Image: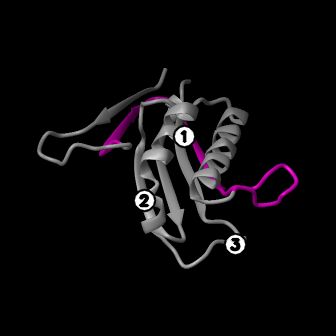
Amino acid sequence: MSELRRVNPESLAAPRGFSHAVTAAGGTLVFLAGQTALDASGRVVGDGIVAQVEQALTNLLAALAGAGGAPEHLAKVTIYAVDPEDYRAHAHEIGAVWQRLAGRDYPAMTLIGIVRLWDTEALVELEGIAVLPT
């Protein structure tokens, strides 16, 4: 049986929408490929960062479910954004999407600003690592 523990030391700023560290004991590691706002036909969908995050997260969670996991098994998520300021400006709305789709047990998270993604219409890509119970 695997166990994920979220660690948020009081000596660090209080996290909002992420955990500072996540420990895992036991379990099976799942490495989730980066997911953008592609629909099932391979077309980028979503007008704006919030809609694209919702589709990318939906895709990431579908890949995780296909491997036998659920949102609470996410230990680490990396977000690549072509416009980090736009992401930050919509953080409250993005947080609401995250909570609706994945709950409030946040993984360790990192946002990295990049020049562009593989699909030029994509604004964001999410990749993750999960730990499934054995």
The answer to which of marks 1 and 3 sits earlier in the sequence is 1
Q: What is the three-letter code of the residue carrying label 2?
A: Ala
Mark 1 in CB contact with mark 2 (< 8 angstroms): no
The disc label shown at residue 132, or none: none
Mark 1 vs mark 2, foreground winner is 2
Outermost residue to the bottom: 115
Residue 31 pos. (x, y %):
59, 48
Residue 62 pos. (x, y %):
70, 38
Mark 2 highlights which residue?
Answer: 89
Q: Is residue 98 above or below residue 120?
A: above
Q: Is residue 13 left or right of residue 81?
A: left
Mark 3 highlights which residue?
Answer: 118
Outermost residue to the left: 11
Asked if the magenta segment contains residue 27, the reply would be: yes
SS class of the residue under badge 2? helix
Asked if the magenta segment contains residue 101, the reply would be: no
The answer to which of marks 1 and 2 sits earlier in the sequence is 2
SS class of the residue under badge 3? loop
Mark 1 highlights which residue?
Answer: 97
Counting other residues with Cα less than 10 Å from the Cα at mark 2, is it few (<14), some (14-19), or many (20 or more)? few
Mark 1 in CB contact with mark 3 (< 8 angstroms): no
Q: Is residue 129 left or right of residue 107?
A: right
Q: Is residue 85 left or right of residue 125?
A: left
Q: How is colour applied across the structure in the image?
A: one colour
Q: Is residue 18 above or below residue 73?
A: below
The answer to which of marks 2 and 3 sits earlier in the sequence is 2
Mark 1 vs mark 3, foreground winner is 1
Q: What is the three-letter code of the residue carrying label 1?
A: Val
Residue 36 pos. (x, y %):
67, 57
Mark 2 in CB contact with mark 3 (< 8 angstroms): no
Q: What is the three-letter code of the residue carrying label 3?
A: Trp
- Report the magenta residues as a range: 19-46
